Image (cartoon, rainbow, N blue to C red):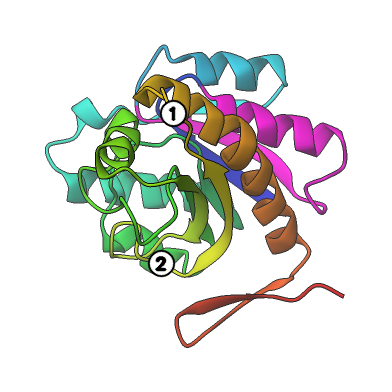
Amino acid sequence: MNISVLVSGGGTNLQKLIDAEKAGRLGGGRITCVISSKPDVYALERAKKAGIKTAVLNRKDYPDVHAYSIAMRDKLMEEKAELVIYAGFLTILDESVCRAFPNRMMNVHPALIPSFCGKGYYGLHVHEAALQKGVKVTGATVHFVTEECDGGPIILQKAVEVKNGDTPEILQRRVMEEAEWVILPEAARLFCEGKIRVAHGKAIIIEE
């Protein structure tokens, strides 16, 4: 199954997907293209080192979100993407993309949705909000991408303890290491093995 991965930064989540593929843990999925919303990000280097085709669709080259979304949709179709994974991809695309790939686009969000999600909740902002609220557990969620930001069917979640003395940066790292890097490759494997079914807005995992 052809997987296209969308990135905007360093690509740590991408690296975990690359490692999972090398270890045979992507359920027959193959990362065929990595597309970045910015030039010169390290995620592109990670892809090149792994021998994966790369492309840059620079958000700044497009006048608005719709024009950018149409270009991304066309690029993904050109790449014959069967699964699209947001791995630290920070540009919100409009409905033209998710309608072209219904229940075939997944994103990892660094919180337990529906907490600390939606527009404005990205990167360190998520962890700042969690610490400000004083939650005792946070975590990460892999969900399908729909027209509603962070509102698609939830595929997998993993909880992470919030500790005394945590800073947003420390918490961000723990959530990545203990949750994001674990559940994103796992969700990709389940998808590629045909073990995710969506019914009534919910993702159901079918594991024998």
Q: Is residue 191 above or below residue 73?
A: below
> Residue at the spot x=68%, y=62% of the render?
191
Residue kind at label 2, given as amino acid type: Gly
Q: Position of residue 174 (x, y in %)?
A: 55, 29
Q: Give the range drawn in magenta.
A: 11-37
Spot the residue most to the left. Answer: 63
In the image, residue 28 lies in the stretch drawn in magenta: yes
Q: Name the residue under label 1.
A: 164
Q: What element carries label 2?
A: loop
Q: Which of marks 2 and 1 is nearer the N terminus?
A: 2
Q: Quadrant of the C terminus?
A: bottom right
How many numbered marks, from 0 up?
Answer: 2
Q: Is residue 187 above or below residue 45?
A: below
> Residue at the spot x=83%, y=32% of the render?
22
Q: Where is residue 33 in the image (x, y as percent from the top left)?
A: 59, 36
Q: Residue 152 carries which label?
A: 2
State left or right for residue 194 relative to residue 183: right
Question: Considering depth in this image, is 75 or 85 the residue closer to the camera?
Answer: 85
> Residue at the spot x=20%, y=43% of the render?
120
Q: In which quarter of the image is the N terminus?
A: bottom right
Can residue 84 be seen here?
yes
State left or right for residue 157 relative to residue 29: left
Q: In this view, does 80 lie above or below 62?
A: below
Q: Is residue 148 above or below residue 205?
A: above
Q: How busy is the neighbourhood of tag 2: few (under 14 within 10 Å), some, or many (20 plus)?
A: many
Q: Where is residue 137 in the image (x, y as percent from the top left)?
A: 47, 47
Can residue 81 be seen here?
no
State left or right for residue 14 relative to residue 100: right
Q: How busy is the neighbourhood of tag 1: few (under 14 within 10 Å), some, or many (20 plus)?
A: few
Q: Where is residue 114 in the image (x, y as percent from the top left)?
A: 36, 62
Query: How far apart, in angstroms, are the residues tagged by discs 2 and 1?
Result: 32 Å
In the image, residue 107 lies in the stretch drawn in magenta: no
